[in-house]
Image: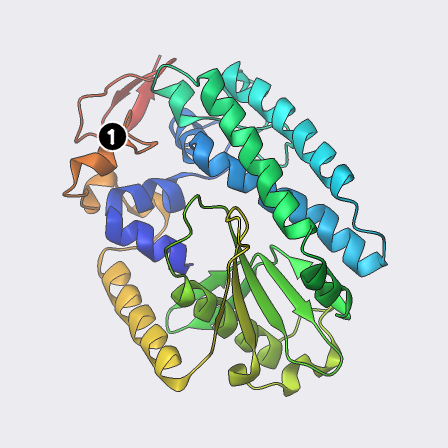
């Protein structure tokens, strides 16, 4: 299964993609190497974590409020975000993820920082800055009355819903941040961004979401999709990137065109050919790390969560196990 995010990982470093998408598997309990890779795959920077918290709060509480016609109370959202912040911060800085019985999935307390695993930890300044950014991002969107009223005018909203469809020999998965469905208007797809400057454009990502929604809606709609969703053409879909951290609440609208759909299809075809040639369609026991090349940019290695196990660097030990030829020995 591939995604736009996964292909970007593959282009950046095939070995990174292999560890994250083939080796890592939360269902595997007794294979120490695969459990270690699974844990490492969940490491994130403090910068990324702040965005994850904002996504999680909006996915849970904004969806609940809109669909149930509850008041959108900013103070409550921020209170929940700060509770999540404190719980996950303590879990990560105490490295509880390293405990033998640590639950790696479906654990609301789980968090693991690259800075704690490889570096010198996190400074109070970084912690306070991340907290301030979370409050700012949530305040910007929840105080955006016109936007909240627009969401309230929808019939139904969903968030972080996996959309899976077939493309050639692969399954393709996309997970849009937020989709609003309307009785008399086409679906509206939103992509939240928590970036300091907000200068990058994400039209390719939103086009990928539009294609995924259209494929699913016209072939096998999810049970909770509105009955009218299949009547809309993909060109009717509305796409918006919302820069939550920017003081001006930057919203960038994108439009689905034949040219963008064609370009996306060409990119996906190219991705599938390249990944298929590398063996990305095979199972874990049919592959080894050496089948996948590493990045040419050392700066990627320095920030990579798999640097301890990748045989191309100088790291040979983890905190509990010694790595030799991709197997752990006590």
Residue farthest to the front?
Answer: 248
Q: Residue at x 66, y 29 (%)?
A: 82
Q: Nearer the viewer, residue 45 or 314?
A: 45
Q: Compared to 65, does 232 lie above or below?
A: below
Image location of residue 286, percent across then percent down: 30, 47
Residue nearer the viewer, 133 or 48: 133
Q: Residue at x 19, y 41 (%)?
A: 290
Q: Which residue is depicted at the point 40% across and 30% down?
A: 40
Q: Quadrant of residue 192?
A: bottom right
Q: Quadrant of the N terminus?
A: bottom left
Count of numbered labels shown in the rendering: 1
Q: Secondary structure at mark 1?
A: helix
Image position of 148 with respect to 300: above or below: below
User: In the rendering, at what x and y percent does residue 309 appear?
Assistant: 28, 27
How many residues crowd around disc 1 within 10 Å: few (fewer than 14), some, or many (20 or more)?
A: few
**In the image, is 302 to the left or to the right of 115?**
left
Residue 266 x/y as whole percent: 29, 75
Which residue in the protein does label 1 denote? 302
Q: Quadrant of residue 34?
A: top left
Image position of 173 (left or right of 11): right
Residue at (69, 72) in percent of width and height: 181
Spot the residue most to the left: 296
Where residue 177 sits in the image (x, y, percent)?
Answer: 57, 56
User: Can residue 27 be seen in this snapshot?
Assistant: no
The color scheme shown is rainbow
Q: Is residue 326 visible?
A: yes
Q: Nearer the viewer, residue 139 or 41?
A: 139
């Amino acid at each position: 299964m591939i995604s736009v995010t996964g292909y970007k990982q593959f282009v950046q470093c095939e070995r990174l993609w292999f560890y994250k998408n083939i080796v890592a598997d939360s269902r595997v309990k007794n294979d120490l190497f695969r459990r270690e890779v699974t844990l490492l795959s969940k490491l994130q920077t403090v910068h990324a974590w702040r965005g994850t918290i904002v996504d999680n709060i909006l996915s849970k509480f904004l969806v609940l409020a809109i669909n149930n016609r509850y008041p959108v109370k900013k103070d409550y959202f921020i209170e929940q975000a700060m509770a999540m912040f404190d719980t996950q911060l303590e879990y990560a800085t105490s490295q509880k993820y390293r405990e033998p019985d640590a639950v790696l999935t479906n654990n609301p307390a789980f968090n693991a920082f690259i800075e704690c695993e490889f570096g010198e930890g996190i400074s109070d300044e970084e912690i306070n800055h991340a907290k301030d950014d979370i409050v700012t991002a949530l305040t910007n969107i929840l105080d955006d009355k016109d936007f909240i009223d627009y969401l309230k005018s929808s019939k139904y909203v969903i968030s972080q819903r996996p959309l899976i469809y077939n493309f050639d020999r692969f399954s393709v998965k996309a997970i849009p941040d937020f989709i609003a469905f309307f009785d008399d208007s086409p679906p509206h797809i939103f992509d939240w961004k928590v970036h300091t400057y907000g200068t990058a454009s994400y039209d390719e990502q939103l086009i990928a979401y539009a294609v995924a929604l259209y494929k699913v809606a016209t072939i096998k709609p999810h049970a909770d999709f509105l009955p009218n969703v299949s009547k809309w053409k993909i060109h009717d879909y509305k796409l918006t990137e919302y820069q939550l951290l920017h003081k001006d609440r930057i919203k960038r609208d994108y439009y689905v065109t034949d040219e963008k759909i064609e370009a996306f299809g060409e990119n996906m075809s190219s991705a599938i050919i390249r990944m298929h040639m590398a063996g990305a369609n095979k199972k874990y026991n049919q592959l080894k790390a050496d089948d996948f090349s590493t990045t040419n940019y050392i700066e990627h290695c320095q920030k990579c969560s798999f640097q301890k196990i990748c045989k191309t660097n100088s790291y040979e030990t983890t905190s509990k196990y010694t790595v030799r030829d991709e197997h752990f020995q006590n």
